[in-house]
Amino acid sequence: MSEAFKRKVKGTVMEIDRHLPELTESFEPVASEARPGTRLMDRLPDQVIFDDCSSLLEQDALEAHERDLFTILRNVRLSDDTVYCSVDASLPDNTQHQAVSVAILYWEFEEFNRVCHVAGRVTAPDAELFAICSAIILATQQDNCEKIYIFTDSIASARRAVDPSLHSGQGHSLAVCRTLAAWLAEDSSCTITFIQVPSKLEWSIHKEAHDYAKDLISPAGLRPDTSIDSVWKAVTKRSQETWTRMFEDPSYKGRNFLHLERLDGDALKPTYINGGVWLSPVGDNLLVAVRLFRCILNHAPIGLYYK
Amino acid sequence: MSVLAFDIAQFFPSLNHVMLLAILRKQGFSSFMGRFFASYLVDRFTSYLWGSFRSGPRQADVGVSQGSALSPVLSALYIAPVMKLYHMQAVALKTSLLSYVDDGTVMAQSKSLDENRETLKDAYALLLCLSVAIGLVLEHSKTKYFIFDRSHSDYSPPIDLGYAPYTGKNLLKPNLYWRYLGFYFDRILLFYKHVRYYSTKALSLVKAMKMLGSSTRGLPPKEKCLLYRLCVLPIATYGYRLWYSEGAQCKKALSLLKTMQRKASLWITRAFSTSPTGGIESLAGLIPVHLHLQKMAGRANFRAATLSDTHPLRLILGQDHHKGTQPHPCAI
């Protein structure tokens, strides 16, 4: 089909063909590592450890967790068979730059390697996954290494790193699974531990990785790498922005629609996440919700009103 | 384009074991696999349980069992020689044969509907020969005939299949709509009937849901919103990729869905019935239907990247997406 003819033809297949090049990531839907029974977590579940602290919301619990982190750090510094890594990612707040993934590797008290990769136009978990992947590959290459500790602020990305099924950043996960499967199978005493460090703690070696990632500002270039999550996010954002623009038009929302603002002065914008802006605070109370909605709309047909 | 949809009578039970094992052997499966399937298929017994009563074993030695996980694979392998022989022998006919388990279709494409009719008649005769040879029976009375034509003429020549009941004076006339896998195809492929069917279905669901809550009692609005998004929207947008794409003419179809969503948002917010659509939609946290479809279609475009290298959809895309595999002859 010639290019001129392609432009004339409309339809779903043509749309897919036109948009698919925007995604640079490739996938392995039937990877042998992802077969049930041969997956890394099916074969060696005891050697991959996650230290989760997602329930830590209060200040006291956070301080206790920080003390635990220092204890772990002291222990790993004293042991002579442990590589410990601090990983982080930095996402730009504009579209002209791309994300950066950083991994810093330590042995005893010394830093022995640090890497910084540009990750493309991706989401935060993807960039974090890339950082974890590069840290694991470099750590397993170190001689006499029997234990790996990885300090990360996204434990979800750590779990994704050892999951070879189809998801955003599957290539990194497959690389991690292949490397770890070989490394863990060598010796049953080898373990890898993922430790969550909440970024608001700004903790010791994790802060160092965070600052290093912030230092590099990389322009996006003409065609940056994208992940499936990032292109999906862009599509969702586009629809959401169109809706917001539509909402600004009084002929769409109604001329008497009550203008409400947030505490910081921003006007309320419509969203469908968690039931929407208006529904989420009052959605559980039927009577209040119905009164509120009728007040906001300020609309009553005369006949119904007199009834 | 003209299409003949045919049905195989009693497909799963009528698969012949000896033939199936021979086909497996011919297709290059190891003798171990052959023995496994021989043991799996032949000399099967079933017994029925009703309360505490249990019947004695009865022989269930026909075909492959319906609902078994292996049945679709085995039936696809069984029907593969028919398709291969058809493609070898029907080169001159220029038709394409598609099959989804036991739902088969023969398609003929040409500039003239009369020419298509003759081609389809020959193709059907050939198909019947092949099916009989392999032990399958075509149910002629269930055969259907459709015409897809974008010209404004309504010329629809009936077809003489040559087999009862569609022979002699009783010719097979083309149907107006074709329901295939839950999609309603119409003559000019605008899919208005399809959207109308599913939006009406969703609308009646919304109307039925009214009994779950009024403005004073019943479900709170947040639950109603969740119910609508989970149970109604997927029905209303079923098969949207057929009719919704960039630049498609679907204003009429969208208006049906908008009406349906308006009713749902009125039910969620319990606002007065003449309230502005945009206002109640935003309050109920429902994105306008056309934006919802735009979002879903935009996301679905990229899902093609997660398909395997030999997936039929990937093979009909442009050459950048084939990854070294042989593209489909109709690839763009």
Image (cartoon, coloured by chain):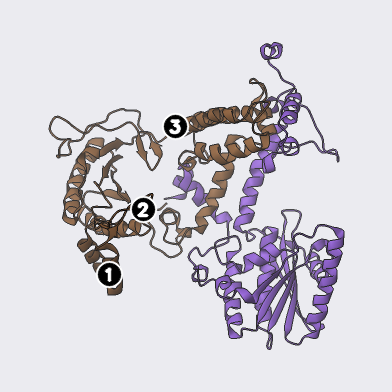
Q: Are marks 1 and 2 on the same chain?
A: yes
Who comes first in sequence, dot 1 or dot 2? 1
Which amino acid type is shown beneath numbered disc 3? Tyr
User: Does residue B165 show up?
Assistant: yes
Where residue A54 appears, as percent x and y from the top left, is 74, 60
- The quadrant in which residue A112 appears is bottom right
Q: Nearer the viewer, mark 3 or mark 1?
A: 1
Q: Quick check: B172 left or right of B233?
A: left
Q: Secondary structure at mark 3?
A: helix
> What chain letter is assigned to the residue under label 3?
B
Q: Nearer the viewer, mark 1 or mark 2?
A: 2
Look at the picture and state if B169 lies above or below A123: above
- Mark 2 lies on residue: B67
Out of B332 and B275, give the one closest to the viewer.
Answer: B275
Label number found at residue B197:
3
- Mark 1 lies on residue: B34
Q: Are marks 2 and 3 on the same chain?
A: yes
Q: Secondary structure at mark 2?
A: loop
Color used for chain B? brown
Where residue B161 appears, as percent x and y from the top left, is 18, 39
Which amino acid type is shown beneath numbered disc 1? Gly
Color used for chain A? purple
Out of B270 and B162, give the one closest to the viewer.
Answer: B270
